[in-house]
Image (tube, rainbow, N blue to C red):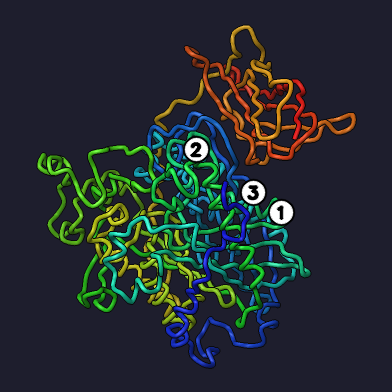
């Protein structure tokens, strides 16, 4: 784990702010109190006081066994246990002067699907009435690629998990709602501040062939073809930190698609590190424009050099670097120059947007079309996927024989083909029955917190795509460009957004840019309209309503049968005991007669614990949310109803004492009654 915790994690000091300084300064207008909704300038201290702030965290982990995982969308990736739980982290900021409030939630999940967005908002309406709405709530995902699958109502995503999984969906919705409730209940007078740093060794440009097609004035903004910006929002009560939000662009793909354990990726690791170091602080690491940013620095999931070919260690390294960069930004934080919070939202049908030529590179009017998945998308991102699903597809090209067979180029109208050109259409997702397989009516949202402006969109934007949206919003609101972030993966999910220039190369990201070559100009136009309306103090209205697809959501996987113990055993019996002694750095293993973990998801609880002898009793020192533990579920050979649970504890360096491993299970009888039980290993000694 070379580099973890070292000062080199911060990378060289190449300042993006210096590069952007001249252009950003040109967007600032003196006396911006005249811009409606941006708040009056004033003393820095005054601008960051006068708030109520709150933060909350809640477990949102779904089914950890026997169901599909989400992130890589590969049918063969079926969960077989748990490494770490994934969490929702919520932050609420209320302007005491106006009563305006915003809610910002980052989920450790792969995607914040429209189904989750609608489910959370319904629950909030039921509990709080009109206090929390589509406009002032932002829900976003870290884009971890190893969370629970089947939580979308969109068949493009749920079919990889063989249908809708209500247990995981309910866990994710409930976890987000619980986090918001805890943040709401913790509201108290406080302050907010903003800090920045840069991080140059936690991301790599995975689509260089596409990036290089952009004009020089865009590429010059990103030396090394990465976005190094780290932005931190600090929430404090009575001078004590309660919440920290750290934005940085890198994909949640440190742990590759061979993994079968539900877990967090590098951003979840960074949160875990911060919250372990500072108990009581809720620390989120949301994405920005991470569409073409890979954490696999050599652009190979199992790279033999740097940071490491070990996925788990690579995850920790990239997470640690984000944590340290967040710490540096926090140390640099200061009060803001503007006060208040604002938020607006508008829904747009991206399958049919007429685009003014002022938003296109060639100055010509354009349009979008219904969603179409390209052949480059079928190939997957070769830089981040280990298991290539269809090896005869390649990014940027298609096997000529496949194209000649005529089975790939989907039959679509000529006008759609023109809008999507040069994409070779593999699947016409927007035209499939009974409704589009991905959402097409989706929200664009702008959220302002003091000086910070978030342009939130339900997709993965490349860094240059994000830059162009940020420019549009900064110009409309007359604020510095560096104060505007593209908040990706927000309030829905519809794959990627590339620039029109990048789109031409039809790399993976271009193949997944669903609404055609002019998808980004459609977003730019939509954000310009929304930001201009915010500046004027006018309302664009709700826009078209998104489809509620909850009515037809089959689950193609039968529920687990009633449990039976391994023959000749009882639930909780130890099958394989740990050795009597270990040295720190080794792994202790125990196997138990178990039951199906999905009988009880144990949210805010644990499936396992490692206990240390303390006097005459035992004290829990690790559980199923610890980086050092794993829970593996399997069926004995030939069995359909018995379960074996293996608990593995990678003993941290420096550990010493007497320990034991405990497993907590729940078995279901034929009548559906669920009964809990416990298994306990023998004690064993650990020497440092």
Kindly report the distance in space between the C-alpha atoms of the residues bearing marks 3 and 1.
18 Å
**Chain-order first, disc 1 or disc 2:** 2
**Chain-order first, disc 2 or disc 3:** 3
Question: Mark 2 and 3 residues: CB-CB less than 8 Å, in contact?
Answer: no
Compared with 213, 427 (above or below) is: above
Kindly report the distance in space between the C-alpha atoms of the residues bearing marks 1 and 2.
35 Å
Question: Mark 1 and 2 residues: CB-CB less than 8 Å, in contact?
Answer: no
Mark 3, Cα crowd under 10 Å, few <14 / some 14-19 / many 20+, is many
Residue at 52% x, 39% y: name it: 168
Q: Name the residue under label 1.
A: 277
**Chain-order first, disc 3 or disc 1:** 3
The quadrant in which the C terminus is found is top right
Mark 1 secondary-structure assignment: helix
Query: Image quadrant of residue 613?
Result: top right
Mark 2 secondary-structure assignment: helix
Q: Which of 306 and 569 is in front in this view?
A: 306
Residue at 26% x, 61% y: name it: 503
Residue at 29% x, 61% y: name it: 210
Q: Name the residue under label 3.
A: 58
Mark 2, Cα crowd under 10 Å, few <14 / some 14-19 / many 20+, is some
State which mark lies toward you, 3 or 1.
Answer: 1
Mark 1, Cα crowd under 10 Å, few <14 / some 14-19 / many 20+, is few
Residue 71's x, y, as percent? 43, 44
Residue 280's x, y, as percent? 73, 55
Kindly report the distance in space between the C-alpha atoms of the residues bearing marks 2 and 3.
19 Å
Q: In the shown orientation, is residue 664 left or right of residue 149?
A: right
Mark 3 secondary-structure assignment: strand
Q: Name the residue under label 2.
A: 166
């Amino acid at each position: 784990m070379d580099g973890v915790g070292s000062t080199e994690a911060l990378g060289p000091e190449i300042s993006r702010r210096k590069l952007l300084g001249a252009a950003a300064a040109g967007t600032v207008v003196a006396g911006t109190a005249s811009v409606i909704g941006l708040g009056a300038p004033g003393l820095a201290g005054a601008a960051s006081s006068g708030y109520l702030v709150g933060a909350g965290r809640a477990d949102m982990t779904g089914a950890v066994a026997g169901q599909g995982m989400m992130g890589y969308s590969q049918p063969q990736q079926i969960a077989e246990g748990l490494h770490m739980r994934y969490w929702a982290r919520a932050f609420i900021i209320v302007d005491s002067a106006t009563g305006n409030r915003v809610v910002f939630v980052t989920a450790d999940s792969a995607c914040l699907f429209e189904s989750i967005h609608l489910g959370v908002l319904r629950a909030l309406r039921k509990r709080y009435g009109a206090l929390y709405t589509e406009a002032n709530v932002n829900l976003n995902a870290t884009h971890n690629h190893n969370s629970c699958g089947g939580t979308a109502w969109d068949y493009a995503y749920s079919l990889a998990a063989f249908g809708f999984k209500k247990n995981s969906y309910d866990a994710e919705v409930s976890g987000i709602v619980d986090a918001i409730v805890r943040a709401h209940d913790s509201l108290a007078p406080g302050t907010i501040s903003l800090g920045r740093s840069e991080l140059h060794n936690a991301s790599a440009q995975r689509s260089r062939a596409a990036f290089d097609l952009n004009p020089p004035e865009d590429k010059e903004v990103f030396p090394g073809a990465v976005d190094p910006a780290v932005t931190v929002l600090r929430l404090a009560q009575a001078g004590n930190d309660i919440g920290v939000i750290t934005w940085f662009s890198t994909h949640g793909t440190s742990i590759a698609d061979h993994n079968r354990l539900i877990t967090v990726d590098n951003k979840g690791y960074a949160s875990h590190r911060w919250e372990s170091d500072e108990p009581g602080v809720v620390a989120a690491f949301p994405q920005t424009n991470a569409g073409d940013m890979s954490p696999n620095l050599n652009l190979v999931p199992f790279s033999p050099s740097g940071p490491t070919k070990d996925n788990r260690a690579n995850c920790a390294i990239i997470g640690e670097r984000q944590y340290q960069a967040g710490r540096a930004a926090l140390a640099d934080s200061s009060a803001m120059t503007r006060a208040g919070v604002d938020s607006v939202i508008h829904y747009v049908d991206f399958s049919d947007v007429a685009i003014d030529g002022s938003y296109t590179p060639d100055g010509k009017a354009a349009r979008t079309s219904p969603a179409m998945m390209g052949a480059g998308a079928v190939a997957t991102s070769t830089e981040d996927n280990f298991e290539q699903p269809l090896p005869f597809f390649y990014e940027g090209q298609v096997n000529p024989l496949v194209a000649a067979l005529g089975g790939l180029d989907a039959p679509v109208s000529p006008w759609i083909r023109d809008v999507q050109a040069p994409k070779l259409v593999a699947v016409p997702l927007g035209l499939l029955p009974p409704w589009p397989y991905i959402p097409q009516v989706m929200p664009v949202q702008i959220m302002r917190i003091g000086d910070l402006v978030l342009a939130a969109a339900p997709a993965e934007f490349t860094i240059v795509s994000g830059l162009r949206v940020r420019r549009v919003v900064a110009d409309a609101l007359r604020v510095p460009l560096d104060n505007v972030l593209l908040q990706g993966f927000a309030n829905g999910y519809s794959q990627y957004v590339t620039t029109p220039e990048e789109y031409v190369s039809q790399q993976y990201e271009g193949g997944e840019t669903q609404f055609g070559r002019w998808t980004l100009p459609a977003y730019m136009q939509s954000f310009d309209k929304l930001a201009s309306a915010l500046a004027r103090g006018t309302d664009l209205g709700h826009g078209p309503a998104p489809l509620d697809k909850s009515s037809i959501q089959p689950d193609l996987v039968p529920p687990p049968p009633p449990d039976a113990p391994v023959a000749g055993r009882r639930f909780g019996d130890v099958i394989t005991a740990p050795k009597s002694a270990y040295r720190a750095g080794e792994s202790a293993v125990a196997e138990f007669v178990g039951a199906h973990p999905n009988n009880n998801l144990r949210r805010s609880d644990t499936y396992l614990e490692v206990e240390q002898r303390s006097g005459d009793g035992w004290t829990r020192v690790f559980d199923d949310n610890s980086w050092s533990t794993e829970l593996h579920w399997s069926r004995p050979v030939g069995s359909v109803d018995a379960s074996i649970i293996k608990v593995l504890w990678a003993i941290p360096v420096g550990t010493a004492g007497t320990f034991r491993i405990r497993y907590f299970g729940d078995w279901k009888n034929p009548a559906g009654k669920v009964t809990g039980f416990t298994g306990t290993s023998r004690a064993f000694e650990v020497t440092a």
